[in-house]
Amino acid sequence: MKFFLFLFVFLLCVLRAESIDTNSSYLDTAHKIISDKVTGYSDTLDQTISKLFTGKKAQNSYDDFFKNEKYFNETEKSFVSVNLNTQFQSKYKEKSTLNINANIALKRTNQKLNLFISGINENKNIIDKNAATELGLNYFRSDSYEIQSRYSIGIRGFYPFVRARYYKVFIAKNWKIEPMQIFEYSSKESFTERTFIYFDNTLTDRSLLRLTLHRETKTKVKGMDYDISAQYYWNFNKKNILSISEIFSGNTEYTTEQSSKKYSGINNYATVLTFRKNIWKKWFFYQISPSVNFHKENSYKANYAIAFLINLYFGDFD
């Protein structure tokens, strides 16, 4: 029943959004006020901090459109992004979230300092302990050999952390290769190390193939997590992008809830189809993601899911 109620409301919002006159001045005014506040506060903070302190790279257009994790890891823009997300699964209870990510660029410091906040979630029952609210300061700099770096200090929940991220872009024929290394120490989880390697191949003017390798280790967790994924993006319309992903996840040492026996290897296979559309206004997006995964904890039986997302984006646009 909840599914059909949410689906009805979701479709109603979409149809209503499509039918409203694009010259609706009161919504344009409200959006302009919020966006001006975001950039205005950024400028005020920038002027204050620039008194104490005396390479921006182009974003991949697909990451910019999807506002995904890679985009938030790399962007230096000022923005506030609000996500309303509901997911229904055949093996688990539905989840509803309200997430906010924000970034305040301090341009008078040569765009080297950003204030950030991420991971805010209204529904306290579904917050993942590894994705708690973060608040802190980023410092960007370009090191030697064209290695880009970002250093962060902040607080996650009630626990302080420091983080360093390094990445470099290589071009090999038709492939853009971007390795990224992240080191973090927090008073709660001790040391964490993560590695990402992105392989991007622009197949046509409207399509992109991305292969991603990921590994992660933590001091307090045995074994090493790893993921291998392949994503195909198809920009069949200026305001519509479709992507399909195949994801294989595993660990070198893990146990299940059903048994204390130690296992290793791939423990989850997932296929995700995502349709994202920009409608009504340039700052309003909706996204539908049907998926299926086969996890060891479910004895590799299919877990069908569908997620609905509405994204409101305030701030700087490309």
Image: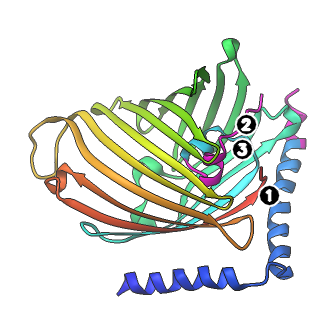
The amino acid beneath tag 2 is Ala
Residue 230 position by quadrant: top left
Pick out the residue farthest to the front. 204
From the image, tell me which residue sits under label 1: 38
Residue 305 in the image: above or below residue 226:
below
x, y percent for residue 58 = 73, 36
Residue 154 in the image: above or below residue 193:
below
Looking at marks 3 and 2 on the same chain, the residue that comes earlier in the sequence is marked by 2
Is residue 90 rendered to the left or right of residue 79?
left
Measured Cα–Cα span from mark 2 to mark 1: 22 Å
- Residue 218: image tag: none
Mark 2 element type: loop
From the image, tell me which residue sits under label 3: 115
Rate crowding at label 2 as few (under 14), some (14 to 19) or many (20 or more) other CA atoms within 10 Å.
few
**In this picture, which residue range is highlighted in magenta?**
47-68
Mark 3 element type: strand
